[in-house]
Amino acid sequence: MLTRARGCLLGLAAGDALGRPAENLAPEEIARRWGRLTEIEPGKGGTDDTEYTLFAASLLCRYGAAMTPADVAREYREQIIPGIDGPMRGAGFSELGAIQALRRGLTPPLSGLWHPHGWSDGLAMRAAPYGIFAAGRPAEAARLVAVDGVVSNSGEGVYGGQAVAAAVAVAMTGAAPGEVVQAGIAAVPEDSWTSRNLRAAVEAVATGSVEELYAAVVVRHYPWTDLAPEAVALAFAGYLMGAGEVEGSVVSAANLGRDADTTAAIAGALAGAGRGEAAVPERWAAEIGPATGRCLPVVAGRHVLDAATDLVAATGRVA
Amino acid sequence: MSSGDRIRGAFVGLAIGDAAGWPSARHRSTLLAPWSRRLERELDAFAEEHRVTTLPVPFSLNQPVEPLAIGPSDDAEWLAWTALTIHEDRAEAFGRLAERSDLRVRISVRSALDNLAAGKRPPASGHDNPHFFDDAAAIRAVAFGAASADPRADASVTNAGDGVHAAAAMAAAIAELVAGGPMPSAVEAALAELPEDTAIGHMTRTALAVAREAGDPFAAVPALDAALLDHVYSYGVAAAQTVAAALALAEVSAGALSAAVPAAACLSSLADSAPALAGALTGAHTGYQALPEGWCATARTLVGCGIPDLAGTDLIDIAGGLA
């Protein structure tokens, strides 16, 4: 349990850091710049994916399974909003939209509904701790992540978080990648964009063609890449292409481009949960230090490995 | 006044509003050669680089200047296309568009056409769509309201959620006005289609409250900007914002186009479609005969900047087909 939890968040942080320079690039451009992107840029670290994950983990340690959307909204007001000195850095549309909504006094679920970015992958990127907390219980992971999710997201953005949390919960049992992905699909309504995209991604990966994967899940005529149905589908595809191995999954996801830091982070969380801390390449682990707080000052100094250890301890308290 | 005059008022009112917003000139400039617009983008970069506040406007160098005269653009063309195809199955009508490469369309419509081409049927074509919430269907719903027809099957091809609610609300308001109802009843009919627990339901009620408090359309502009916009996202076509602003301005203008449309055009983030929606509502209220003559003359003829085969089409003829 502990090694899987630490592998999950270390894999997430490594994926975030590896994918960061490839964000918003097409696979052809990534190939042109790096051949194949396999190394973390030294000293650069991760982004909002890691920092918001640390924040979600702290919420779970504090509130556990009894957490409510009102608790999460209060934490945003007390922990995040006062720390914003001038413009926010490195956050996604859904977090910025939610913070603007909370600042004007709106409460969940309106805070996640009021802005038009409900489908953003901002919840999916921080969903892994819910899967650790509810290891082996995908339905509970999906329920809990939505408690956090409705503060900032709505609709497909919540489903994306639920798919990731449920899949991590099953990966934490050591299940095979195919079973992990199916658990993610089972956690969301069948008649949803997320479900349709995840099923299409599984089929496209079986063909081995990146072109088919793109045709199946990437919105071609939209400039932003943080659509949860697309990003979660690319992340799961990377995880399947890497056969659940940490390095293969993270590298596959990052080299698919689009929201590459988030997709590689999710793939890394799934693979790290399945294979454990020791399966994360040492050269990557060496690049993961305490969070800088660049995106979220409240988590500055926190390390993903400590957050994972605390999460496991919190799980024990509940059980 | 006849219902036919009110239908003509809705159509030409929408075109006047479409023409009044600043994005109209940019849409119409797509009739010029691409290099002409590339120069404009370079001048924009020049202003940034040289720190000058003299910003470029659409201009014509060795190109025809007529497209840059004030006039209607994409919204009026989509209204005309909808009226012309209103008796057809909506997926089939859009399916024909999906085969074309000469259209310029909103992100919701582009994504829906891609979905249709890939074999995805409505409502998934409108649902699996990054801009499911935009007002493309609300614009088209003016035709359905004029014909007293349900806009939902049409709206679901390109939109979902708030985008479909918005279409139902616009059609209900236009139908009420075309039948001779007063503006407050039209706003009530729209509100009945907007559940309170949706973004569009919440925003429309908020917009009405702040606009009523401000007292008149122009006075309401800063309050609407503050109440509806968070200025976080890169596009201003969310139906929750544009339909809310249009309904609020139509009501506090007491149905007067010359008060509602200029105020909507001042909401610069929403100026692509809020003026058009406000124009449709107020035009349907007063009827075509009451609209300002100079605006009618310039707004009734389409140029084909979104749907090329509609170039030269007279909206009055199109509206006559529904009257």
Image: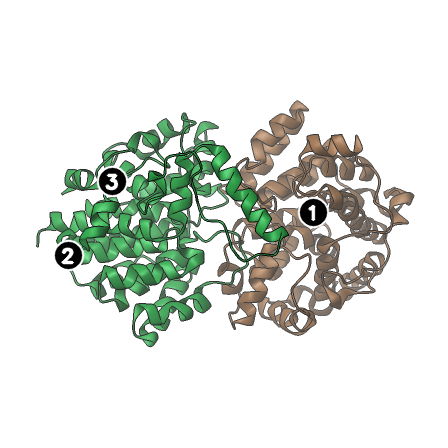
Chain colours: A brown, B green
Q: What is the three-letter code of the residue carrying label 1? A: Thr
Q: Which residue is mark 3?
A: B301
For label 3, the crowd category at 10 Å Cα-Cα, with few meaning under 14, some 14 to 19 and many 20 or more, is many
Q: What is the three-letter code of the residue carrying label 2? A: Ala
**Which image quadrant: the C terminus of chain A?**
bottom right
Q: Are marks 3 and 1 on the same chain?
A: no
Inter-mark Cα distance, 3 to 2: 18 Å
SS under mark 1: helix
Which residue is drawn at the image coordinates 39% and 35% (left, top)?
B31
For label 1, the crowd category at 10 Å Cα-Cα, with few meaning under 14, some 14 to 19 and many 20 or more, is many
Q: Position of residue A1 (x, y in %)?
A: 82, 52
Q: Position of residue A4 (x, y in %)?
A: 82, 49
Chain letter for the residue marked with disc 2 in the picture: B
Which residue is drawn at the image coordinates 32% and 60% (left, top)?
B262
Chain letter for the residue marked with disc 1 in the picture: A
SS under mark 3: loop
Left or right of A183? Residue A294 is right
User: Above or below — where is A280 with respect to B258?
Assistant: above
Inter-mark Cα distance, 3 to 1: 48 Å
State which quadrant residue B259 falls in.
bottom left
Q: Which residue is mark 1?
A: A262
The label number, if any, that marks residue B9 in the structure image? none
Is A257 or A123 nearer to us in this picture?
Answer: A257
Does residue A128 appear in this view?
Answer: yes
Q: What is the three-letter code of the residue carrying label 3? A: Thr
Does label 3 or label 2 sit earlier along the sequence? 2
SS under mark 2: helix
Q: Which residue is mark 2?
A: B290
